[in-house]
Image: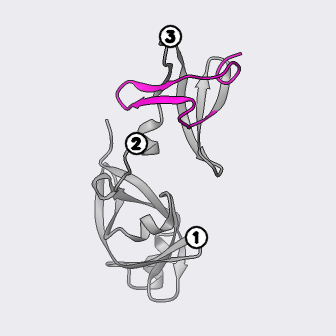
Amino acid sequence: MKSNYLECGIIINTHGVGGDVKLESLCDTPQVLASFKKIYFKEGDGYRAAKILKASVFKSFVIARIEGIDDMDKAISLKNTTVYAARKDFKLPEGSYFIADLIGLDVIDNKSGKVYGQITDVQNKGASDIYVIKTPDGERMMPAVAEFVKKTDLDKGVFVEVIPGMLYD
């Protein structure tokens, strides 16, 4: 079952003495994280909303003032805390998917229906995303580009056409 909340950042430090926090973005860009009006903290099986009073991008990080965090002690207590955003607050471009939704999907040959394995991670080293796939022969990597990925169905899997040696020996 898909969660209604997705990891969007990690509070990595304080910023100043007024309770502002420095966040590492887990979004495509820090600008995406800085655009949220609310973030959520996971508490047990639920999520607690917190209003973002202000946020800005500083280098590759986000500096934010969070409602209720108004001094350095409160900010320090949040260090290394993962923050979440509501799935509905993201605006995904057509043909884009959340990494959380791709993890665990079968990677299936588009012609034969053979299942090569499951996606265990999605990395980005520059030009395109790379799917990390657990196969019976071990871990393999595949560029997530139209040449190889023919269709993504979040209920069935990722349908691919691969070259010999990419996902099998």
| Residue 91 position in % (x across, y down) | 34, 56
The dot on residue 95 is: 2
Pick whichever, 136 or 94, lies toward us: 94
- The majority secondary structure of the magenta stretch comes to loop
Work out whether mark 1 precedes mark 3 in sequence or the reverse, and give the earlier one. 1
| Residue 84 position in % (x across, y down) | 38, 58
Quadrant the N terminus occupies: top left
Q: Residue at 40% across / 42% down in the picture?
A: 95
How crowded pointer 1 is (Cα within 10 Å; few <14, some 14-19, many 20+) is rated as few
Name of the residue lying farthest toward the top = 112
| Amino acid tagged 1 | Ser
Q: In the rendered structure, which segment of residues is drawn in magenta?
A: 142-169
| Amino acid tagged 3 | Ser
Q: Is residue 152 left or right of residue 50?
A: right
Quadrant the C terminus occupies: top right
Residue 59, compared with residue 141, is above or below; it is below
CB of mark 2 within 8 Å of CB of mark 1?
no
Residue 19, compared with residue 11, is above or below; it is below
Is 66 one of the magenta-colored residues?
A: no
Pick whichever, 94 or 101, lies toward us: 94
Q: Which residue position holds label 3?
A: 112
Snapshot quadrant of residue 3 = top left
Q: Is residue 53 left or right of residue 159?
A: left
Using the numbered discs, state the Cα–Cα distance from disc 2 to disc 1 in whole angstroms. 26 Å
Work out whether mark 2 precedes mark 1 in sequence or the reverse, and give the earlier one. 1
Name of the residue lying farthest toward the front = 147
